[in-house]
């Protein structure tokens, strides 16, 4: 789960940078970042309150399996960037 959370953080930070630079939307960035991989990612939050700072939250669900986990666990990560 740690590795997945780190990967999500990298994606959220990259998406925030892309949006702050006015290059693309979060969904466009995620489509490029997936590179054909089958992730079930959802953009939980995308906001730019002051018009300069972009905050992005990305989540996914993990089905770990095993006797102690009967349902998927939701893992989220955040990223932020500020344009000049």
Image (cartoon, helix red, strand yellow):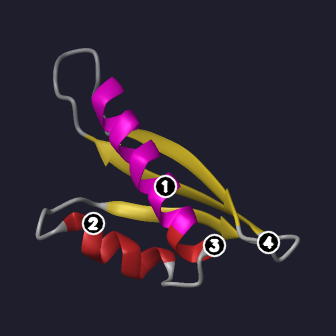
Look at mark 2 in the image and give the residue it sits on: 33
Closer to the eye: label 3 or 2: 3
Tell me the chief SS of the magenta region.
Answer: helix
Q: Residue at x 29, y 23 (%)?
A: 69
Look at mark 4 in the image and give the residue it sits on: 52
User: Which badge, 3 or 1, is on the more N-terminal residue?
Assistant: 1
Q: Is residue 5 magenta?
A: yes
Residue 10, placed above or below residue 83? above
How far across and down, in percent of the image, does residue 57 sit?
57, 55
Position of the C terminus by quadrant:
bottom right
Q: Residue at x 59, y 76 (%)?
A: 21
CA separation in Å, label 3 and label 4: 7 Å
Do the numbered discs 4 and 1 sit on residues whose CB atoms are within 8 Å?
Answer: no
Closer to the eye: label 3 or 1: 3
Q: Residue at x 79, y 71 (%)?
A: 52
Pick out the residue farthest to the top: 68
């Amino acid at each position: 789960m740690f590795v997945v959370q780190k990967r999500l953080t990298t994606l959220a930070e990259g998406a925030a940078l892309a949006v702050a630079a006015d290059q693309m939307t979060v969904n466009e960035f995620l489509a490029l970042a997936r590179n054909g991989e089958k992730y079930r990612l959802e953009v939980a939050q995308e906001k730019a309150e002051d018009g300069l700072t972009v905050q992005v939250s990305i989540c996914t669900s993990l089905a770990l399996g095993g006797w102690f986990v009967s349902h998927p666990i939701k893992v989220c990560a955040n990223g932020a960037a500020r344009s000049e």
